[in-house]
Image: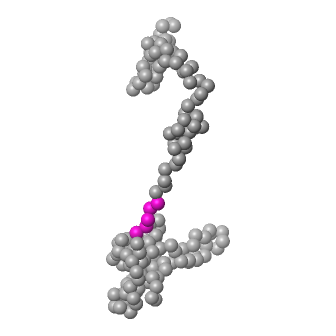
Amino acid sequence: MSTVPKPLVKVPTSIASGGLVRWRTGKGFSIAELKAVGLNVEQARLLGIPVDERRDTSWPHNIETLRKWLIDLLEGRIAPPEPALPKVIKIKRKRGRAFRGLTAAGRKSRGLMSTRYRETHNYKFKKKAKERKLKKRHEATRGLGNLLRISRIINEAKKKK
């Protein structure tokens, strides 16, 4: 028992296959099992005990094996394991300048700069200004939502009668 014990977890089985309970070695001890022994996640990782934060179950045989291992460790029957270092997080490096659209070629390839219609979009501004004046655009009904639309429908129905 010189190495860190491995936890046992249930293998999910269907009732159709007999519903037999099978056990396998798990990824690590659950947080509830560590709390039952009196450890938290940081202390367990420093001792080299594997921790599975995704698992919610707490099995009595896992608690018992962990408790026996800790007693052997404290009494000096086994050598303490080396502490596990915290996980290193890798940060992705920035993509190239062209991909981010920082160069003319990159903007063109991403469709951010259309060469054919570069000057022809000016007609839209006149059209939008005219719609704003007539209060046809969405900015005129901003914040009112369906209330304004419903009231317009009711007013138009009254005018027709």
> Whole-percent x and y of residue 144?
40, 24
Instruction: Please state the extent of the stretch shown in magenta in the rendering.
Output: 86-90
Q: Main secondary structure of the magenta part?
A: loop
> Whole-percent x and y of residue 81?
41, 83
Q: Is residue 29 left or right of residue 71?
A: right
> Whole-percent x and y of residue 139?
43, 22
Q: Is residue 108 left or right of residue 62?
A: right
Compared to residue 147, the image places residue 63 above or below, namely below
Closest to the observer, 87 or 15:
87
Compared to residue 105, the image places residue 130 above or below, namely above
State the scheme by which the image is colored: one colour
Closest to the observer, 131 or 21:
131
Q: Is residue 121 shown to the viewer in this render?
A: yes
Compared to residue 75, the image places residue 158 above or below, namely above
- Report the residue at 47% width, 10% height from top: 158
| Residue 156 is inside the magenta segment | no
- Report the residue at 49% width, 80% height from top: 6
- Report the residue at 58% width, 77% height from top: 22
Q: Is residue 29 shown to the viewer in this render?
A: no
- Report the residue at 40% width, 90% height from top: 78
**Residue at the farthest bottom position:** 77
